[in-house]
Amino acid sequence: MKGLYWQQISSGEETNFVILEKDNLPVLNDNCVKVQVKACALNRINMKLLSEIKMEKEFLPIGREIAGVVLEIGGKVSSFQPQDEVVGILPLDSDESGLCEVIVIHEHYLVHKPEKVSWLEAVGTICDGVRAYTALHYLSFVSPEKTLLVMDGASSFGTIAIQLAQHRGAKVISTVYSLEDKQYLERLTPSLARIIDESNGKYDLTESCLEETGGLGVDIILDAGVRLYSKESETTSQHLLPHKHDIITLLSVGGHWVTTEENLQLDPPDSRCLFLKGATISFLNEEVWNLSNMKQGKYLCMLEDIMEKLSNGVFRELSQTITHSFS
């Protein structure tokens, strides 16, 4: 059985993609299912995370979001039957590549795929869906009447976060970095409260958000990266990102900042401002669900709800995700 893997050459930065062929599939244990893969999404490998949790290997499997048909089930599997259509995310420690015709996976990493959802829609949504649910339900508790600022809302993750927040009744403001992204968000229904185009420098993020909220600030901020220092100290690609101080200024009393910046550093004045507002910062790492099995039930409920909302049209007009489909 062939699969695609990523190999790092020695200890240097040179890398190589290789196709490995295994003689046999892993043994089908009691709680595992054998799945014929119909589609697989491709996302970058987080080498830094794997190194920190001691999961480095010579060959790292490519493709973790998979959808397919159950071929065979283990003796103690209770959730699935042969011919069921399923979707899921392979765990971090998986030795199997999603870019393979048949894989063996534990049943607790899979949920049923609705019939009306295509293979590509399923794998293209599930990872960003987990990120959005983690950010808005488990870290910041989005609810009706709250105001949410989504940075780079035209990204696949941003689009799902916007639609999930609107479904919960929140008022959504979003930033974009190009005219095409702005036009894309303008097509979404219901319409956003405000779209701030930062590509031409005409609009100030802080002024625009405070104007939209009557000077009260934003209840929840979901960033796509932040500048930690002055523009002179940052790379060109970071110039459009908001400064951390701007984010803190935008927060309302009791507000929540959900950040994707893993190296965030706060100065004493920043901490003082957060203290005075009673605001909080949470770090978005969707892999926590796979790093601990303590909340596996919640994780599966989240995956099921993502598929249900995709089937019911709550998630729609999604940005394209690179996928591979097996004929």
Image (cartoon, helix red, strand yellow):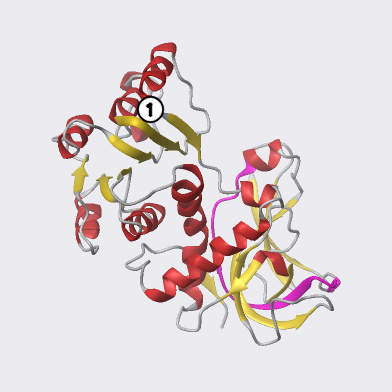
Foreground of the two, 96 or 305: 305
Q: Is residue 63 visible?
A: no
Residue bounds of the magenta highlight = 27-47
Q: Residue at x 24, y 59 (%)?
A: 184
Q: Determine whether 288 is above or below 122 in the image.
A: above
Seen in the image, is 223 located left or right of residue 126? Answer: left
Q: Position of residue 26 (x, y in %)?
A: 83, 69
Which secondary structure, mark 1? loop
- Quarter of the image with the C terminus in it: bottom right
Decide: few, some or many residues near mark 1? Use Cα within 10 Å; few <14, some 14-19, many ≥20.
many
Q: What amino acid is found at the position of numbered circle 1 in the picture? A: Arg
Q: Is residue 302 visible?
A: yes
Q: Position of residue 323 (x, y in %)?
A: 50, 67
Q: Residue at x 77, y 80 (%)?
A: 73
Q: Determine whether 317 is above or below 140 in the image.
A: below
Residue at the extreme top: 268
User: In which quadrant of the rendered view does residue 269 lie?
Assistant: top left
Foreground of the two, 92 or 82: 82
Q: Residue at x 21, y 53 (%)?
A: 182
33 in the magenta segment = yes
Q: Residue at x 85, y 71 (%)?
A: 29
23 in the magenta segment = no
Number of marks: 1
Circle 1 residue: 227
Q: Position of residue 325 (x, y in %)?
A: 53, 75
Seen in the image, is 265 located left or right of residue 291? Answer: left
Q: Position of residue 206 (x, y in %)?
A: 22, 30
- Quarter of the image with the N terminus in it: bottom right
